[in-house]
């Protein structure tokens, strides 16, 4: 009986110790996984593939990127938020999933469980037009849409994406009626614009800059002009001060990941964002390095969530799950 009790206690102790999360003093002791909710090659993938070798060097263990595309980024973030909170799984947070998707339908994670670690970058969105129709600026496009309600199209990488919401925001602020056409990914939507299937897109500035010789970049969705496209006016300049949108990327973790571990990861990321060779390359891509505390990141997403909830309600946008 005594032997049995001893073995039972020993097993319980062993399993109990196994369940204890890693502590900061010996973390990390193995490679760290960073989940990206999109296929390789996109803007967010490029950001982390630039940064993470440096972050891994700071931490003494490699940061391995795992691409998990699906549901416009929702699948990857859900996987990261629901992972074991042992300090060896992090994810890349994106505004469209964290602040928009929960208002459009069910998501595979509880927003309250998201552990916000730090922002990485912000990048303003721009409106891009097909000049084949004679649209050389945003005013001409809006004017044509006002004269022919429902006859012009705008594309996006998918329903519920952040750039889908940009088009809805413009419709509300400019009082126009244009048809949304969702595609499977950014490349397909750009090809649709080139082929005149749609007449407008909202895209991240880094995706727009290489298209200047084929398409018309009509406006930066912000209050200040971008150094990357200094000749392009802002929506605020053009009379649409409420049409403001950016891509916002950050690092998230499972909710119960120990603070000592997320603090270490945050410190490494901040140090890397300050490296000239990293910062300069990000700026050339239209990405503005934006290191923050976890609390600052959380508050920003709460503000954005309220803003986009208002747009979704006012436009009566519904997405089939």
Image (cartoon, rainbow, N blue to C red):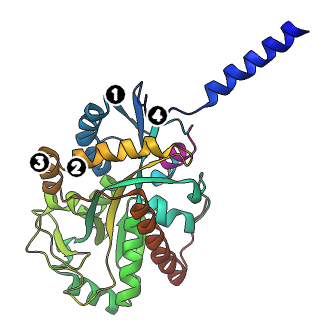
Report x, y in % for residue 140. 21, 86
| Prevalent SS, magenta region | helix
Please report contact status of discs 1 and 3: CB closer than 8 Å, yes or no.
no
Q: Which residues are magenta?
A: 76-84
Q: Secondary structure at mark 3?
A: helix
* C-alpha span from label 1 to label 3: 22 Å
Please state, as top left, top right, bottom left or bottom right, where the C terminus lies in the image.
Answer: bottom right
Relative to the observer, which residue lies in front, 300 or 318?
300
Q: Which mark is residue 88?
A: 4
Mark nearer the N terminus (1 vs 2): 1
Q: Which residue is mark 2?
A: 273
Q: Badge 1 local density, few (<14 within 10 Å), some, or many (20+)?
A: some
Relative to the observer, which residue lies in front, 254 or 175?
254
To which quarter of the image does residue 201 belong?
bottom left
Q: Badge 4 local density, few (<14 within 10 Å), some, or many (20+)?
A: many
Q: Secondary structure at mark 2?
A: helix
75 left or right, relative to 283: right
Magenta stretch: includes residue 81: yes
Magenta stretch: includes residue 153: no
* C-alpha span from label 4 to label 2: 21 Å
Name the outermost residue toward the top. 3
To which quarter of the image does residue 113 belong?
bottom right
Placement of 124 over or under 86, stated as above or below: below
Mark nearer the N terminus (3 vs 4): 4
To which quarter of the image does residue 303 belong?
bottom left
* C-alpha span from label 2 to label 3: 8 Å
């Amino acid at each position: 009986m005594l032997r049995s009790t001893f073995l039972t206690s020993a097993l319980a102790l062993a399993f109990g110790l196994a369940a204890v999360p890693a502590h900061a003093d010996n973390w990390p002791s193995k490679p760290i996984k960073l989940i990206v909710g999109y296929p390789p090659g996109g803007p967010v993938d490029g950001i982390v593939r630039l940064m993470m070798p440096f972050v891994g060097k700071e931490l003494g263990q490699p940061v391995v990127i795992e691409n998990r595309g699906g549901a416009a980024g929702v699948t990857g973030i859900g996987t990261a938020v629901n992972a074991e909170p042992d300090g060896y799984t992090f994810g890349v947070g994106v505004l469209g999933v964290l602040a928009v998707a929960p208002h459009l339908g069910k998501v595979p994670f509880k927003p309250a469980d998201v552990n916000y670690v730090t922002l990485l970058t912000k990048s303003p969105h721009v409106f891009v037009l097909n000049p084949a129709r004679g649209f050389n600026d945003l005013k001409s496009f809006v004017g044509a849409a006002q004269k022919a309600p429902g006859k012009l199209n705008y594309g996006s990488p998918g329903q519920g994406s952040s750039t889908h919401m940009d088009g809805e925001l413009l419709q509300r602020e400019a009082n126009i009626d244009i048809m949304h056409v969702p595609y499977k990914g950014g490349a397909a939507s750009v090809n649709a614009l080139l082929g005149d299937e749609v007449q407008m897109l909202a895209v991240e500035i880094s995706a727009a800059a290489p298209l200047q010789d084929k398409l018309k970049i009509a406006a930066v969705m912000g209050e200040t002009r971008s150094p990357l496209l200094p000749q392009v006016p802002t929506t605020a300049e053009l009379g649409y001060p409420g049409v403001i949108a950016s891509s916002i990327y950050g690092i998230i973790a499972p909710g119960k990941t120990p603070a000592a571990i997320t603090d270490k990861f945050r410190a490494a990321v901040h140090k890397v964002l300050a490296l000239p060779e990293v910062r300069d390359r990000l700026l050339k891509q239209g990405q503005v390095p934006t290191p923050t505390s976890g609390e600052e990141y959380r508050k920003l997403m709460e503000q954005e969530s309220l803003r986009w909830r208002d747009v979704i309600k006012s436009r009566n946008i519904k997405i089939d799950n």
